[in-house]
Image (cartoon, rainbow, N blue to C red):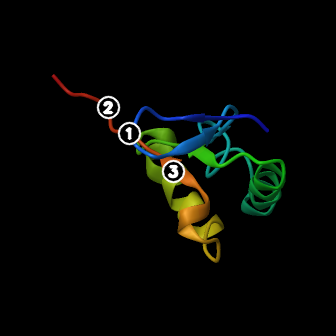
Amino acid sequence: MHYRNLGRSGLRLSVAGLGSWLTIGHHVPDDLAAEQIALCFDRGVNWIDTADAYNRGGAEEALGRLLQGRRRQDYILATKRPTVG
């Protein structure tokens, strides 16, 4: 896996990440999502993209369950909120 630094933040992100829109917490059951997450981490992926709008918060809730037991410093969880107005 190749990695890039995120500006001067000190974060080192894999060039590939795992997206959770329409998958985790929605169309993909937790057991399969857990396998996908494990496979990504095994391959060197270290960041996951999510948002509170993905399945009305379902993606974030599922990721909260699925990431339990993993060391927080081992991954980057990128979440966002839509801009209103």
Of the residues shown, which amino acid type is indicated by label 2?
Pro
Q: Which residue is mark 3?
A: 77
At horizontal 74% and vertical 54% (from top left) the residue drawn is 37
Residue 28: percent from left, percent from top: 74, 48
Q: Which residue is mark 1?
A: 80
Secondary structure found at label 2: loop
Please state which of residues 8 and 31 is positioned toward the viewer in this rendering: 8
Query: Alpha-carbon distance for marks 3 and 1?
Result: 10 Å
Q: Which residue is mark 2?
A: 82
Residue 5: percent from left, percent from top: 54, 36
At horizontal 76% and vertical 61% (from top left) the residue drawn is 34
Residue positioned most to the top: 85
Residue 54: percent from left, percent from top: 50, 40
Q: Is residue 12 above or below residue 75?
A: above
Q: Is residue 6 above or below residue 68?
A: above
Please tell me which of labels 3 and 2 falls first in the chain. 3
Query: Label 1 crowding class (10 Å Cα cut-off): few <14, some 14-19, many 20+?
Result: few
Of the residues shown, which amino acid type is indicated by label 1?
Lys
| Number of marks drawn | 3
